[in-house]
Image: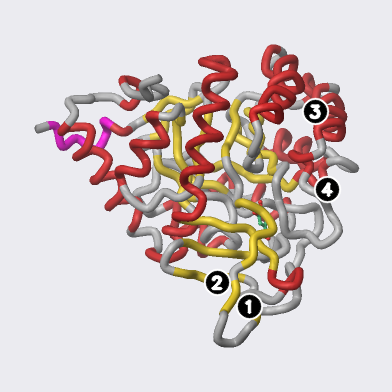
Amino acid sequence: MNTCENISKCSFNGIEFKNCILNASGCLCTDKKELQSLYISKCGGFVSKSCSIEKRDGNPEHPRYFETDNGTINSMGLPNMGYMYYVNLIKDFTEKPYIISVASNYLFENLDILLYIQETSSFPQLVEINVSCPNIPGKEQLGYNFNELDKFLNRLSTYKESLPNLIIGLKLPPYFDPAHFHRLRDILNPYIDNNIIKFLTAINSIGNALIIDSVKESPVIKPKNGLGGLGGDYIKPTAISNIWQLYNIFEDRIPIIGCGGIKDGNDVFDHILCGASLVQIGSQLMKEGPECFARINKELIEIMNDKNYSNISEFRGKLKK
Ligand code: DHB
């Protein structure tokens, strides 16, 4: 039996991940202490909290995060330390891929964040632009406004020559109709062809869900009248459907990071089978802590050994039709 940890490794846009399992942005990645705990954990790479230009405290009403047996709901409202904090940590995290997540809400007016990342990084730097934050009152998710998404990408493309070190991807919201995937394909195709967008992360939480406490007759979280982003078991079928549809639409032209409802090795296997190259863990990381990475990686390797796979590329996107 091959117990080598490395059979779940992945080369992604030329960057080597020792295993394919990362945290999802937003989970245990808001300050240096949390990021350090990811850095020293068994994750293959890690992602920062989505950042804005200025530091933000997030939505003022608490609780803004709640766990059930089947998943989580949150309406944090983008609490973060401001982009410089996360970019200045690049120099401390040289031994493992560190992905900077940037909230698109603010980038639209101001692409300075990307220029600052470029100035700070002497190596290729992965950047996940989050076009799917559901929790800012009054701000729509850019990923659901296709015209604005196209305008944003068009503006981003004018900066291409100024951002040679950046490997930019998009964190997408879940889509629920094949027509929306076709529209997304038509919009993204030119930016993929021109190497502006080099990976896709799917999916962010299912936005504006409602979990209620029937005894108290009230929502379990406070901001936005109880509406928040759903994660965990609730969303795995939606997540792998989105990954599978993106994989079929774009084939091998762009790698996908799978996210949504992963709590064990079998869930990772399913995400990869539907087309993911790397995966991210959100709700389960919040529940279990960074120890989840070693456990889940071990479970994935056991499944791969049972099935005689020695590399994740042998089953990636191989879901039977
Ligand atoms: C937050 C939630 C998200 O799902 C996201 O993509 C970005 C930010 C938040 O509420 O902090």
Q: Which residue is mark 4?
A: 106
- Quarter holding residue 160: top right
Residue ID at (14%, 32%): 2
Label 2 vs 3, first from the N-terminus = 2
In the image, is residue 5 part of the stretch drawn in magenta? yes
Three-letter code, disc 2: Phe
Q: Which residue is mark 2?
A: 66
Q: Which residue is mark 1?
A: 63
Mark 1 lies on a secondary structure that is: loop
Q: Quadrant holding ligand 1? A: bottom right
Mark 4 lies on a secondary structure that is: helix
Residue ID at (46%, 63%): 286
Residue 192's x, y, as percent?
67, 18
Residue ID at (75%, 37%): 114
Residue 165's x, y, as percent?
66, 26
- Which numbered tag is attached to residue 153? 3
Label 4 vs 3, first from the N-terminus = 4
Three-letter code, disc 1: Pro
Which residue is nearer to you in this view: 172 or 110? 172
Which image quadrant: the C terminus? top left
Query: What is the C-alpha distance between the residues marked 1 and 3?
Result: 35 Å
Mark 2 lies on a secondary structure that is: strand
Residue 130's x, y, as percent?
69, 43
